[in-house]
Structure formats: C-alpha cells, structure tokens
Image (cartoon, helix red, strand yellow):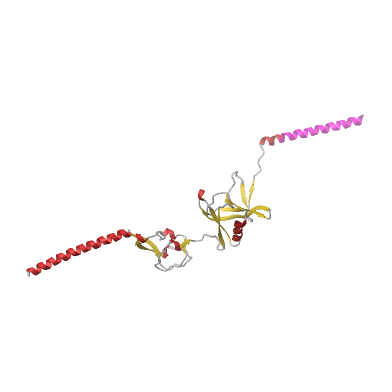
Amino acid sequence: MLEAKRRAAIFLILAFILAAVTGYLVLEKVKELNAELGGMTSIYIAKGSIPSRSPIEASQVTKMDIPNKFVTDSHILSADEFEHQVSIVPLNPGDIITKNMIKPVSNLQDANNRLVTMYRTDKIQFDQVLTALDRVDIIVSTNNNGKKKTEVFMKDVLVAYAQGTNDSFSGIAVEVTADEAPSLIHMQNYAEHIRVLKANVGQASSFGDEIETSEGDGKSEVKEEPKEKPEEETEGSAAKEPENKEGTTDKTEQATKQKTEDSGE
C-alpha cells in the first residue's frame, strides 16, 4: 500500500513538472510570436453599408485590431483622414477601408462647373505664386494668319487649388463652366502664349485710390479725387483779378478823354 502511494506521488510530481515545463515553453513561444508580429494596431473598417460617392461620417466606421506586421501605409489609422472624404466603391459591413478607396469631396461651387489644370510651361506663365481661392485673369496672345493679337480671354476666374508653394509652385486648377472648359483647353493647346495674372478684387491700390466695382460687368474702375490747389496760388489769382479790373477801367477812361479832345479840335 505504501509502495502504491509512493508511486502515485512520484507520477503526480512528474506530471506537475512536465505541465510546468510545457506551459513555460508555450509562453515563450507566444512571446516570440508577439515579438515577430510587433504588437497590435487599430485600423478602420466599415461599420455598416457605405454607398459610393457619398461623404463618409464617423458613425459609419469602426476600429479593428490587427498585428503591426500586417499594417501597411494604405491602412487608415486616424479618424481625421475621413474628413471631407468619399468612398469611390460601395462598402459592406466589415470591409477594411484603405486610402486608395477614398478621395476628397469635390469643392466645386456648382455641379455644372469643371476643373481645368494649368501647369507652368514655356507657353504658360504665372506672374505670381497663387493659392486656393485666389482670382486670376487669363491673357492670351494669338497669331491668326500673321495677325497678332493679345486680349483678355477670361476675367476673375476662381482658383480651386494650387500645385506647390513658393519656389516649388508649378500650376493651378481653375473652376470654369462646362461651356467655357473646351475654349480654355483649346487656348492651352493652340495659343502662342498665355499669361495668368492675379486679380486683386476688392482691394485698394497702393496709392490710396478708391476702387469701385460695377455690378453689371464686374470690371473695376479707378477714380482719383481732384487735387486741391495750393492756397498761395488761390490767393495770388484772387489778388490779380482786382488789378486787371483797375487796369481795364483806366484804359477806358483814357480812350474817352482822347475822343473828347479830338471832337473839340
């Protein structure tokens, strides 16, 4: 009996030791796998059905954790990246959302307007560095059968966005109507030269002249106030007038006396 109890105790001790060793080996393997995977990162997936071409709202997405090893630059890690974005494909619940599935919401003022890009080339020149929401005038020079002509092609055109800043500035995209877009593209292709000027709409000039904008054609007219004459000139001219009047009176009296003497003779 004592021998049987001794054997049972030995088996229990061996089983406990084997279980401890197995648990330790499993724990080390899990740690090794976690080290290879690099932890967990939260990415965004669709919470419900998201139709294409509609702005994505925060309530339409949720988070899911995946190992860092499988996270790529195309995964979306911040909710701010959904701001003013639309999905170009319809999404179902649980679909992982990547950056190539979304694009910015169109900021066109009218659904019938179009964006036409104008990049800096030997033919197209910009007088100033432009930014979004600026206004520009487009000047074109053409040569029709030897007859050269330079004119304002478009005036007060809205800049939707600009490519680059300062020294890296390379061009803009202007917002025009669907009817004006073909004409602008035609000029880009066949005009001899295009000059893009920044329009300072509603700003006063550097000399303090007032600019009044007519509501009809949107053209600006500069009106200069008449300069006041110096006080000295005004007083001088006033002083000369009495002298002239007295001189005229003296000449009239002399002419009358001369006539009287002649008649007496």
Quarter of the image for residue 29 reads: bottom left
Q: Judge whether 195 appears above or below 56 on screen.
A: above
Residue span colored magenta: 237-265
Principal SS element in the magenta part? helix
**16 on left or right of 34:** left
Place of residue 148 in the rendered image (x, y in percent of width and height, measured from the top left):
67, 52
Q: How many marks?
A: 0
**128 on left or right of 9:** right
Place of residue 259 in the rendered image (x, y in percent of width and height, measured from the top left):
88, 32
In the image, 95 versus 240, the foreground residue is 95
Place of residue 56 in the rendered image (x, y in percent of width and height, measured from the top left):
45, 63
Quarter of the image for residue 41 reads: bottom left
In the image, 112 versus 146, the foreground residue is 146
At 8% from the left and 68% from the top, the residue drawn is 3
Quarter of the image for residue 250 reads: top right
* Outermost residue to the right: 265
Task: Please check the rendered image and state whether residue 45 is part of the magenta-colored stretch, yes or no.
Answer: no
